[in-house]
Image (cartoon, rainbow, N blue to C red):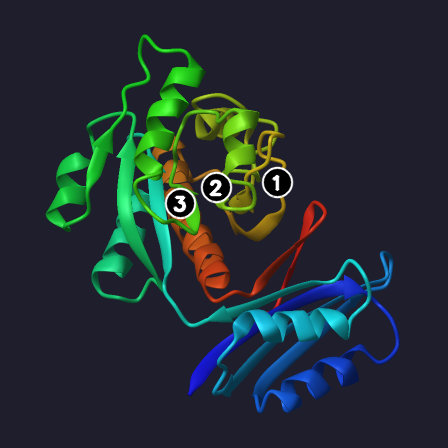
């Protein structure tokens, strides 16, 4: 008995649900859950279907579904296999630690194949949990060479996603294109006016009352990729820089892990510069 998730997006029209369910019934697949959404502004239809059955030919099912749908439809039939991920880090440990602890106790929903860092700071922690750590120094190299070395490591693994867990280097458009739709970043985006290395100090000096974080897909436009999850927390005059940093880190790891859970469970569609998420 197979457990399958089916993701479909296509132009909206009458009869889509009937067409889809008829194909699934013809393949003796039992629908456990089905969620649909229609983007009225763009006349686009999205559905996520969880089903069970004895499916022998996934490619044939995808083809039959495509034949029943409008042109430009996209169909992805996914079996229940763990996603394989790599993580890029710099020095901050809070997001990496959260991911690796869940990985250690098999509650991440994915398998961490390696961690790559441009400093050695997080090697000991990573290797104590049995995860390979690769150091790629960025000093004295141009971006092309630095990214070439990272790609050489990534190419050793069959990966589904690349997670930037507070990786403090800007990736080139060429690198992002090679991993299109597969790179997830965590960003302190509720401080959009504060750029640079010390956003929380700038926020403290400005007297902000809300801080937050956003997890998003990475595109060649810096920190402007499709948003997956966001959270904020209120602060007041009692928060110094240290308290703001501490609160910000708690939000960042919470937001990143929530986004990864949604992605690993195949609940996220990318539609232009937005996402459709079936929770």
Vertical comparison of 125 with 192: above or below: below
Label 2 sits on residue? 185
Secondary structure found at label 2:
strand
Q: CA distance from mark 2 to mark 1?
A: 9 Å
Q: CA distance from mark 3 to mark 2?
A: 19 Å
Residue 266 drawn at (x, y percent): 52, 65
Image point 38% across, 43% down: which residue? Answer: 249
Secondary structure found at label 3:
helix
- Marks 2,1: beta carbons within 8 A: yes
- Position of the N terminus, as image quadrant, is bottom left
Label 3 sits on residue? 247
Q: Residues within 10 Å of mark 2 (few under 14, many from 20)?
A: many
Q: Is residue 226 visible?
A: yes
Residue 223 drawn at (x, y percent): 58, 34
Res 225 label:
1
Which residue occupies the foreground of this view, 213 or 161? 161
Vertical comparison of 112 with 3: above or below: above
Secondary structure found at label 1:
loop
Side of 50 relative to 65 (left or right)? left
Image point 40% across, 27% down: which residue? Answer: 168
Decide which of tag 3 and tag 1 comes sooner along the chain: 1
Decide which of tag 3 and tag 2 comes sooner along the chain: 2
Q: Is residue 279 visible?
A: no
Side of 14 relative to 261 (left or right)? right
Which residue occupies the foreground of this view, 124 or 115? 115
Where is residue 146, by image quadrant?
Answer: top left
Image point 69% across, 50% down: which residue? Answer: 274
Image point 47% across, 67% down: which residue? Answer: 265
Q: CA distance from mark 3 to mark 1?
A: 24 Å
- Marks 3,1: beta carbons within 8 A: no
- Position of the C terminus, as image quadrant, is bottom right
Vertical comparison of 192 with 186: above or below: above
């Amino acid at each position: 008995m197979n457990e399958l998730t089916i993701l479909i997006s296509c132009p909206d029209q009458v009869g889509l649900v009937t067409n889809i369910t008829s194909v699934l019934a013809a393949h003796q697949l039992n629908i456990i859950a089905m969620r649909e959404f229609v983007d009225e502004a763009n006349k686009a239809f999205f559905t996520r279907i969880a089903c069970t059955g004895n499916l022998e030919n996934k490619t044939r099912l995808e083809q039959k579904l495509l034949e029943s749908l409008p042109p430009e439809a996209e169909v992805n039939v996914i079996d229940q296999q763990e996603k394989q991920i790599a993580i890029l880090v710099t020095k901050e440990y809070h997001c990496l630690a959260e991911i690796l602890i869940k990985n250690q106790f098999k509650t991440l929903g994915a398998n961490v194949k390696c961690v790559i860092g441009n400093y050695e700071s997080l090697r000991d922690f990573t290797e104590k949990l049995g995860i390979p750590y690769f150091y790629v120094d960025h000093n004295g190299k141009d971006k092309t060479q630095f990214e070439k070395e990272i790609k050489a490591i990534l190419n050793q693994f069959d990966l589904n996603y690349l997670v930037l867990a507070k990786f403090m280097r800007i990736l080139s458009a060429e690198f992002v294109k090679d991993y299109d739709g597969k790179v997830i970043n965590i960003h302190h985006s509720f401080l959009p006016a504060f750029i640079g290395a010390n956003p929380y100090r700038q926020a403290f000096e400005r007297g902000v009352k809300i801080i937050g974080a956003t997890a998003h897909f990475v595109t060649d436009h810096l920190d402007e990729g499709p948003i997956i999850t966001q959270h904020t927390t209120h602060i007041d005059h009692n928060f110094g820089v240290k308290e703001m940093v501490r609160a910000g880190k708690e939000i960042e790891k919470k937001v990143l892990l929530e986004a990864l859970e949604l992605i690993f469970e195949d609940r996220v569609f990318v539609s232009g510069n937005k996402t459709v998420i079936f929770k």
